[in-house]
Image (cartoon, rainbow, N blue to C red):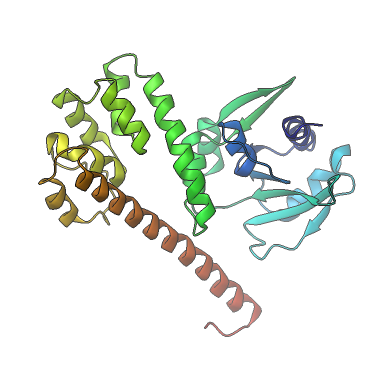
Amino acid sequence: MSPDERLARIVRGIKEAGVDVLVMGGHAVRYYGIDRNTSDFDMVTSVASPAELLAKLPASPLFGAIRAVHAWRSDDFARFEIGTLPDGRQEFLEFWIRNHLLADFVTLKERAEIGRYGEDDVAFLSLDDLIRSKETERETDWLDIALLEEIRDARLLARATDQDGVVEAVANVRSRRGLERLESSGLLHDEETVSRAIEQCTHPVTFAMLYPLTRSSPSRQLPASFESNIIDVLAKETFNSSRHRGIVEVVRRSYRRQAMEKDRMDKEAKVRALRGLRGYPKK
């Protein structure tokens, strides 16, 4: 059975058990076009607790022998062993119930993307939500983000068939390759288009890429943590010069560092809360 067939079977079994999920993690990365071998099936779910999952999943014949595996974030996350692969590795089914990087399940489901796997419809986190879910303290997740952002930029460019689509593509570009494609397509030559895009952009990397083209006022949607001195530096640079590209990477690293720190702080807060519940000293 291929990985895609196995995923479709797993999702079908989850639906049979009356559990609503969206696929995330490695299988979602595969769906969006990046080759990935994984023995885990990562989901985000609407179910309220691990106990509810454990009660519901055995209703599907596929999960009759399911075994719960300890997870330290036991209120937010559940892990189950569902089998053994031919190479001896254990196969796991994992569920995020609450994740500080993601919106509520209803919102995620509204934005989800549906893939057809044989006779099954499989719902995946949207590309934007998948990228957001990977803004963790793990370096490997940021390698995925770099590739996924290139795919996202290419998709937006392919949809840019009218002026609004062009503005959307420009306002959301994040990868160097995506910026090069916009430039070679002639979509960065109109200052009004770039100005509209800067007004709409929400990501500091996008702003850093575009600002030397127009020097419009920054979008109010940029994070408050965006360093104002970077704007002064960017104002002196020529678009796509080696110095400009270097500054963009400085902004990218700063964004990544802050995101990794937020993820680490979330984990530490959870650990402190668990220590308090168990009577451990709050170090």
Relative placement, left or right, of 26 versus 184 is right
Q: Position of residue 234 (x, y in %)?
A: 16, 47
- Residue 146 sits in quarter: top left
> Can you see residue 124?
yes
Relative placement, left or right, of 121 versus 168 is right
Observer-nearest residue: 123 or 110?
123
Q: Residue at x 80, y 44 (%)?
A: 57
Q: Residue at x 37, y 38 (%)?
A: 175
Q: Is residue 102 above or below residue 2?
A: below
Q: Position of residue 271 (x, y in %)?
A: 57, 71
Observer-nearest residue: 126 or 139?
139
Q: Is residue 8 above or below residue 141?
A: above
Farthest residue in the front direction? Answer: 242
Give the position of the N terminus as an image quadrant. Answer: top right
Farthest residue in the left direction? Answer: 236
Q: Residue at x 43, y 38 (%)?
A: 149
Report how many numbered discs are placed on residues in the image. 0
Q: Is residue 170 above or below residue 119?
A: below
Q: Position of residue 225 (x, y in %)?
A: 27, 57
Observer-nearest residue: 183 or 32?
183
Q: Residue at x 22, y 44 (%)?
A: 242
